Amino acid sequence: MEKKKSPLSIRIFYWLSNIALGLLSLVFVAALVFNVVLNTTDFFGKDMQLHTNFPVKVDFLKKGILRMNNENLEVEFVEAIPRIHFIDTPDFITKKVALVLLVVILLGGFLTWTFRMFLKNVKEGKVFNVDNIKLLKRLAYGLLGLWLFNIIYNKIFYYYIAKQLEFENIRISSEIQDLNATLAMALFIWILAHIFNIGLKLQEEKDLTI
């Protein structure tokens, strides 16, 4: 009996997940080496120039002019999401951000590996089984963990850095970037796991009747 070939989209996503997992593995090794060197030597000296996302929205207090249809329209930037550059970054900031980066890469690798295992099962025709239900639940838990980690990180960043900043033409908003999309994805995958569980029970009942 000829084995049924999996859909092209599943095979493409499976191989893309393989590539992503390989790249994440290389990045994780590089981040691990960077953390070790940073914490055990003075290799980088005082020349670190750290750029990182700023998790708090800002308002620019200067207005600009938009030229449109032969008119000058007065505009201003509000609720912008910038990046922050720590000029001559001190060691204690670099070490903390490097550790956060390592944790994020590790979580990303775990999610990618779990998703790859799920796609591998689907590619082989194993859809409604216990392994897939467990993998989907792991994905949901992993996304939930990533969401919580980001919420905590953003809160710490806001209270220890954003609130201490002083700029003449920028107002720091108290609104932290929302991560509702990550939470919604975790809930969706959790529901999907329960749907797979129902499908497995229906399959077992069908096999018993036959």
Image: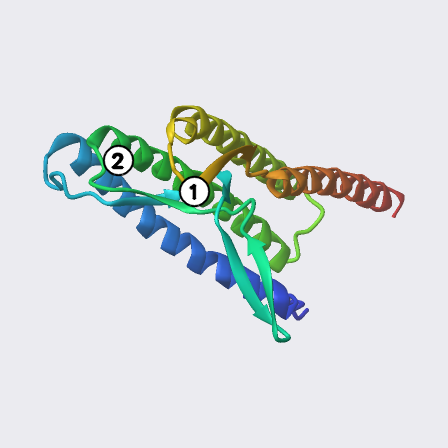
Q: Residue at x 86, y 46 (%)?
A: 206
Q: Which mark is residue 14?
A: none
Whether pointer 2 and pointer 1 mark residues with C-beta atoms closer than 8 Å, the reply is: no
Q: Residue at x 67, y 67 (%)?
A: 4
Q: Residue at x 24, y 28 (%)?
A: 92
Q: Considering only vertical position in the picture, is 75 above or below 134?
A: below
Between 13 and 173, which is closer to the camera in this rendering?
Answer: 173
The mark closer to the camera, 2 or 1, is: 1
Q: Considering only vertical position in the picture, is 153 above or below 177?
A: above
Left-right relation of 133 to 163: right
SS type, badge 1:
loop
Residue denoted by label 2: 94
Left-right relation of 48 to 51: left
Q: Considering only vertical position in the picture, is 7 above or below 121?
A: below
Tell me if residue 55 can be seen: no
Q: Which mark is residue 169?
A: 1
Write down the quadrant of residue 99 in the picture.
top left
- Image x and y of residue 179, in percent: 58, 39
Tell me the crowding category of disc 2: few under 14, some 14 to 19, or many 20 or more residues within 10 angstroms, Cα based.
some
Residue type at numbered disc 1: Asn
Between 197 and 150, which is closer to the camera in this rendering?
Answer: 150
Tell me if residue 154 can be seen: yes
- Which sits earlier in the primary sequence, circle 2 or circle 1? 2
- Image x and y of residue 181, in percent: 63, 43
- Image x and y of residue 145, in percent: 53, 31
Residue type at numbered disc 2: Thr
